[in-house]
Amino acid sequence: MTKKIDADIVVVGAGLVGLAAAIAFAKQGKSVVLVHASKPETKLKKAWDERVYALTPATETWLKELDVWAGVDKSRVNDINAMHIWDAEAALTLADSDANLPKLGVIIENQNLQHALWQQIKTLDVTVVTDAQCTSLHNMPHDIQLGLELVLQGEITIAANLIVAADGVNSWLRNQANIAVKRKSFNQTAIVANFIAEKNHGNIARQWFAPHDTLALLPLPEQYVSMVWSVSTEKANKLLKLSNEQLSGQVQAESQGVLGDLKPVSKTLSFELNQQTATKLIAERMALVGDAAHQIHPMAGQGVNLGFRDVMKLAELTTKCQDMGDFNLLRQYERARKSDIVVMNNLTFGLDYLFAIENSFVKTATHWGLQQFNRQAGIKKLLILQAAV
């Protein structure tokens, strides 16, 4: 016999964005079911995680409001007090003091934030269903019903007012709702690894731009740095064949030795870079959030912040309507989020395109523009405040 669970909201996907959504709705007093395909890894490992995120001050503030930040291991979090950006002939420096801010953001490991989110889930009345495969989805007159197949417990049906699709880039829920996606391949691969630097990084996030080639060294505690190097897939395949020591030598050369010797302290991981945007963010009694709704280039460091902003807006709107699956409410959510997503898509694609243009006039204009930004305190302040959202 199929077991049935009734809830206000079911969140499918227990990545960072899905966990935050479950917490935000539970703190509003809603009955929440969180569904995930596997058992979570909630133990905090000693080794530094290769996956890190740059969180904006607004995101950090929101996580504090959800009581998530209290569970973060602060010794593994590093402030960003400045950003240094280079291209072949010019440079731009953005500092927290330029906008009278205490910091520009923080760098945090995926495992540290995920651990803190799960710790908060455990304090709330959230029904967690793991090892669950989604098998069916049916819209009923007053709810939406999700069918699950569990590894050990058989079949379960969850009936809810609203289903939140946080199930990633290859979202099953998005496909079931027949929502198409627009894809754009960068023909690039991101290589990530951690190093310990000879020189103090000074809480500075550093980024070097070349044609279809972006190297970022992000500050971690104790002179550790996280590298994200986005290059053509052809170049990535060559770099990935190098030993850790050979790769660190390449990174030192590419970063002009600003941090001295770089000693590898982690595995080297890689992933393909694509831009993917759902043509719609909603369906009947369904809202897409995070990677299910959008995937952007990592050069702007805004991917997870963009997903968290999805949840912030959806949680804000659901406080104003008794039926959380009301289509008018969902339309408000879609309208509110689309502009932010378009801006991020244009920013990341535009930067990659701009620094790849071979036209000498455009290159000269780009270098001149970076120099002018450095000289205009007002413009720098506006740029920083926009990025801090």
Image: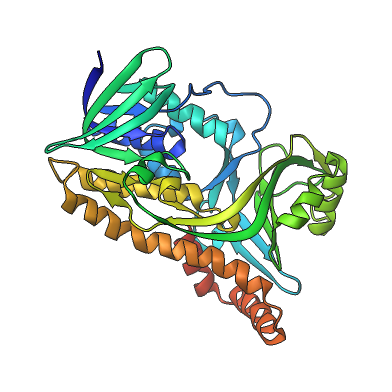
In this picture, residue 156 sits left or right of residue 205? left
Compared with 320, 230 (above or below) is below
Q: Nearer the viewer, residue 72 or 112?
A: 112
Q: x, y percentage for residue 324?
A: 19, 41
Q: x, y percentage for residue 53?
A: 56, 44
Question: Number of labelled discs?
Answer: 0
Compared with 153, 141 (above or below) is below
Q: Residue at x 27, y 53 (%)?
A: 333
In this picture, residue 314 sits left or right of residue 92? left
The quadrant the N terminus occupies is: top left
Q: Nearer the viewer, residue 236 or 302?
A: 236
Residue 110, located in which quarter of the rendered image? top right
Q: x, y percentage for residue 189?
A: 67, 52
Q: Nearer the viewer, residue 111 or 260?
A: 111
Q: Is residue 83 visible?
A: yes
Residue 150, located in which quarter of the rendered image? top left
In this picture, residue 245 sits left or right of residue 144? right
Q: Residue at x 31, y 46 (%)?
A: 177
Residue most toward the bottom?
A: 361
The quadrant the C terminus occupies is: bottom left
Q: Residue at x 77, y 50 (%)?
A: 237
Q: Is residue 227 visible?
A: no
> What colour scheme governs how the chains and residues are painted in the rendered image of this protein?
rainbow
Q: Residue at x 44, y 65 (%)?
A: 343
Q: x, y percentage for residue 153?
A: 36, 13
